[in-house]
Image (tube, rainbow, N blue to C red):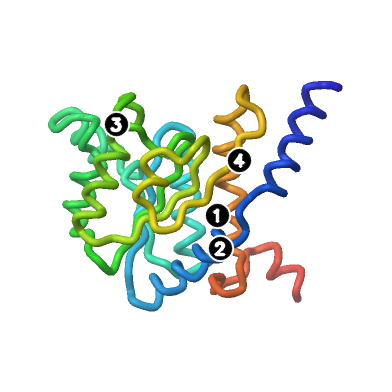
Amino acid sequence: MTFTQHYFERVAAIAQQLDYEAIERLVAELVALRDRGGRLFLLGVGGSAANCSHAVNDFRKIAGIEAYTPTDNVSELTARVNDEGWETVFSEWLRGSRANERDAILVFSVGGGDAQRNVSPNIVRALDEARARGLRIFGIVGRDGGYTRQVGDVVVIVPTVDAALVTPFSESFQAVVWHCLVSHPAVARAQTKWESVAAR
């Protein structure tokens, strides 16, 4: 078996093992968030940060949900890292955003954060801040879900089917799941370009 065949067979296995009920619960949460006029704050680092930027576009444009991510503002992000430190960069951003009980956070992460191992401490601190402020907590994360799963209200876990490929599969399926969310008939408010062209 080639690596390519192995890789895509594992992709198919993950797709079959996803918790579809958790995704449907997340759909209901997003509809409720929009209905109450809440904002969605997306948090992630590395490749997950890039996914946050893409997802913010989709949640705003397709789903009509007010959404933001701190990594879209490099000036503020780097100022906070420089002046306040990496660990508090997201929690302080939530404070500055006046995050409140109408809002929610959505974490994209390979491991979900782990304070004891000092892995993504900024996500852990942000989750604590979100809990203190009464936000709903959502996640699309890999491995065992980490701290996000421990404190989250609805967390979709990307199943581990190959320990050597946890990161690429976790980050890839963040995109698969959020595209499912914004495409869901209960969430979508606008057609994407090519679908709207094809419908003419």
| Residue 76 position within the rendered picture, expressed as x and y whole percent measured from the top left | 23, 40
Among numbered discs 4 and 2, the one appearing first in the sequence: 4
Q: Which amino acid does the dot numbered 2 rest on? A: Val
In the image, residue 11 above or below residue 155: above
Residue on which disc 4 sits? 159
Determine the image quadrant of residue 124: top left
Please name the amino acid that badge 3 sits on. Ala
Front residue of 170 and 38: 170
Where disc 2 sits, the SS reads helix
Question: Dot 1 lies on which element?
Answer: helix
Residue lying furthest right: 1
Q: Sequence order check: which comes first, mark 3 or mark 4?
A: 3
Q: What residue would you read off at disc 3? A: 115
Q: Rounded to the nearest whole Å, what is the CA distance between mark 4 and mark 2?
A: 21 Å
Q: Which residue is mark 1?
A: 178
Number of numbered discs present?
Answer: 4
Mark earlier in primary sequence (4, 1) = 4
Asked whether the beta carbons under mark 3 and mark 4 sit within 8 Å of each other, the answer is no
- Residue where numbered disc 2 is placed: 182
Locate residue 181 relative to residue 76 in the image: left or right. Answer: right
Q: CA distance from mark 2 to mark 1?
A: 6 Å
- What residue is at 18 percent from the left and 29 percent from the top? 85
